[in-house]
Amino acid sequence: MFLYYLRLSALSYRRNPILSTLMVLAVAIGISAYMIVFTLNYTMGGDPIPHKSGQLFHVQLDSGNPNTEADPPVQLTYIDAMHLQETSRAFRQTATSKFSSIVEPANPEIRPFSVIGRGAYADFFSMFDVPFQYGSGWDSAADRDLQQVVVLSAELNERLYGGADSVGETLEFDGDFWRVVGVMQEWNPVPKFYDINNGPFDNGEEMYIPWRHLVARDLPRAGNTNCWKSIEGTGLEAFLNSECVWIQYWVELRNADEEADYLAYLNNYVSEQKALGRFERPMNNALFDVNEWLVKEEVLPEETRILSMLAAMLLAVCLLNTIGLLLAKFLGKSAEIGVRQALGAHKGSLFIQHVIEAGFIGLLGGLLGLVLAGYGLEGVKLLLGNELMVTDWIRLNVPVVIITILLAIVATIVAGLYPIWRACNINPAMHLKTQ
Amino acid sequence: MNTGPIIRALMRNKLGAALIALQIAFTMTVIINAIFIINERNRLMDQPSGMDDSNLFHVTVIGFGDDYDEEIVARDDMEMLRRTPGIVNASVVNAIPVSGSGSSTGVRLIPDPTSPATGTAIYRSDEHILDTMNLDLIAGEGFSETDMRLRYESGATLADKAVVSRALVEELFATEDVDSVIGETMFVDGDKQLQIVGVVEALQAPWPTSTLVERSTIVPENFIDSFSRYMIRTEPGQLDRMMAEVEELLVANNSDRVIRQIRSMPETRFETYRVDSALTTILWVVVGTLVVINSMGIVGLAVFSINRRRKQIGTRRALGATRMAILRHFLLENFFITTIGVSIGALLTLGLSIVLTTNFNMPTMAWYYTPIGAFLLILVGQLAALGPSAKATRVAPATATRSV
Amino acid sequence: MLQMTQISKVFRTDLVETHALREFSLQVDEGEFVTITGPSGCGKTTFLNIAGLLETFTAGNYLLDGADVSKLGDYQRARLRNEKIGFIFQSFNLMPDLNLFDNVDVPLRYRGMKAAERRERIDAALDSVGLLSRKKHIPSQLSGGQQQRVAIARALVGEPRFLLADEPTGNLDSNTAMGVMELLQEINSTGTTIIMVTHDTELAQKSRRNIHILDGRIAEEGASTSAEPAAVPA
């Protein structure tokens, strides 16, 4: 019977091609607008590391200006980050920050170029499950001994070594020689949760080196630096001892007990520092897991939230349109419905027939909507000039495709409920006499 | 024309009319708020930077190698650039306005670090900067060569003088009399004194959405750390040529460095306002789509309702109604529905507008948006109904006498 | 077969009450061919709609095949229509975008029959009206008479106990109308009860029993030649 009704739906479409196409278009436009916004929200506000986002914590220590009500700083000072790193109380931990440098390739045909790199501790790679193409990250001995080791992004490896296994190669930058220990696979978590304050949708860094080199070599910082208190004196030493924050700090804690212990440890540390005259604001230390941190930092741009509302209303307009058109269409079928009743159709079977007919329109609308959403996202990508992989996501994600189509079908059927009800309750006697 | 029968006929087809009215209401809500957002974003994007944007470009220079001396290289570069035909002036500057990255600091009128400070963007540059950016000096004067300070390490400000934007004067001194602040002292980095020597009409901060967007301070100071930005102003019409040539000129001067991000001010503005311009484009698409869907709905239902009433129309014609009367009937019917729609829409618009202003950083909508939107939607409704109504006038009076 | 007792049907709107049938009583026995005549608006179509379970009635009692149908819900009424009643309409009421085969198929679909059996029955029904060779055509490719034959095949395909025809020849020229009438008589001769509304008195003469309705009541009841005396209900 289902296939029979489906065939009737197709025939019915052919009978009023213009009206039916208008409906399909309305559903398609509404659904695609909704899916575009949904995709943007999902990608930009989604969980970038779902399997362990609950165990990775951003550390917040409120070392801010006691004379203002400003939010706690989102980064740490050198003093605090180094203390946390030296005591290493978490299961895993890493200080991390961006730097810039100049690479001088061995190949004389490639001119020196500047790169954005990231300083990190050995745990960075295991904490964030960084995927490797060749080799691996470094070990903690490299952190301790300031070994000149470097991990390359897939892109930089492509540029320098044509994508070959470059582990063991020597790379010259910052006027010195470094040994390549690993080459990452393409790794661009969206949002870039581990460094939100330097652009949540930026691309990843091109190279990684043990963090302490940043200080030892006074490499140029490439991320945000915020100082609420002027630096006392000049030079690197003065900067390191200042209240300037410029280091992100992440820890991995496996359970609530570890989390509580770590927070207690942080509070204890801050109390000690208060005694030394630092941390003049009230105690306000916190651990934010990945998702909490994304929400706290309002990663999802205001624009996508405004668009969400407008898209929902656009969908509503499209569905209102569909209700009207379905009503017109079904009431236009009164004669057929009357005949079907005379021939033995009961209200239940008429109901199913028209639910399937509405669903059929929804299915077509959903399919077309998917295509429109694909193009729409390409357009958004073009407008944003950003390499957000949103279109890949919708193209490759089978559940999303299914959800989109289901949403279209369900929305159309819901929009069709009243028209369907009217269609089922047509008085057959009224419509059998003349056409 | 007597409107009574039309309204009574509408009342008998409540649902069809209600659907169209609701659709118009939602459409109006979205369209008006969208256009308001578009206008707000356009206003933001149109804010003048205070500079001669169309003739400015900038370039980032990063030196490497042990014998790279930025102090010498930068001086040579500046001399060379300023000599180059097609270039009006050039300056070393720590940050580019509207680029999204730069420095800010707090300034005070008293040297008390615990007192509230006024935020300002801080540009460190040289004595040519006012001419390079082509800023409009409205009081005092610019810097001289002797004002320049060179700094080799991070730390507090070294310069003693400052040129500030009018907005900063208004905020800090709470006065519009810019001449009165010339020679006044403000404090930065706690107790470091800066003497205000000049006021410029406008100079945007690097962060266009920040509250301190109009508040800027320029100090005569350069940081020598092998990483520098040059701001370059060209003769009108020479921008593209100079941007193409500048890398070669700089590398010829010294090749131990990387030349990056040669970008014109218009390009930088475009990058910074990318999301805003994307949003306005998307919203225009939304507005256009809604108008089309809405018209589709009106046309679809008008055709349907007219077809259903063909006989009635024929009867009216047979009874002496003119084509004009039939046309008026359907247009008037559409007018009533649309009017109900825009009335509901006006309330919804107000509601969404309140939601947007309370939840997002948006100003209140001006009153005239709603009536103008309502008027335009009624117009669109009439236009959409015109086709089907015109078709209705072509129903022959003889239709009345036929049974099928 | 069909027994109506004191059936009344009142249509109400805000302003007027229309009595379409007034205490209407009628009994039709198995195998009868009854024609109903009367002027426009006399209630003959209302009678047919009530008889065919398409419309409910305001008062009275209606036994169809011995079963009281006045209390049945939509589902059972639909089943009865599907299994026991066949309809033939003045304007044929074929589905314009279904071919003949699919048109005849409609009642069988609601019976949930297996595909093979359906095909067999449809072919037989189309064959019996002489249109099997055109089963892939759509109605608009046929003449009016042919369309009505398809409608008859559709009415018969479910092997109903009785057939309700509402002006089945009203849209046909007289020659074709005769053909359709002959077909109906042939069907009647196989035992199917037929009730036919018509205003063509000549056709009405061809049935064994004619009932004339005026203002919702039976005005006169006559039997044409060779008719058995009609049973007048109590």
Image (cartoon, coloured by chain):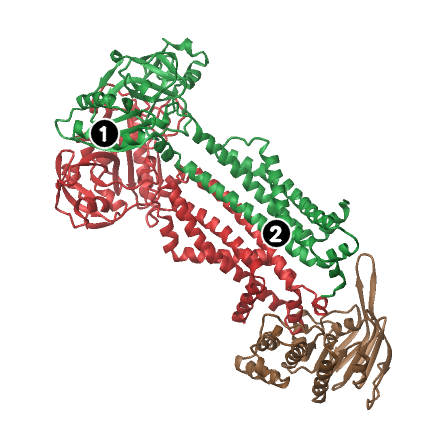
**Rendered residue at 59%/70% (across/down):** C97
Tag 2 or tag 1, which sits nearer the N-term?
Answer: 1
Chain A tint in image: red
Residue B61, disc = 1
Mark 2 lies on residue? B299
In the figure, is residue B89 to the left or right of A335?
Answer: left
Residue A121, disc = none
Taking depth in this image into account, of A387 and A231 the one nearest to the observer is A387
- The chain containing the residue under callout 2 comes to B
Label 2 SS: helix
Chain depicted in green: B
Q: Is residue A342 visible?
A: yes
**Label pair 1/2, CB-CB below 8 angstroms:** no
- Categorize mark 2 by other alpha carbons within 10 Å: few (<14), some (14-19), many (20+): many
Chain C tint in image: brown
**Rendered residue at 45%/50% (across/down):** A35
Count of numbered tags: 2
Residue type highlighted by circle 2: Val
With respect to residue A46, does A211 lie above or below? above
In percent of width and height, residue A274 lies at 31, 25
In percent of width and height, residue B106 lies at 36, 20
Taking depth in this image into account, of C143 and B140 the one nearest to the observer is C143
Residue type highlighted by circle 1: Val
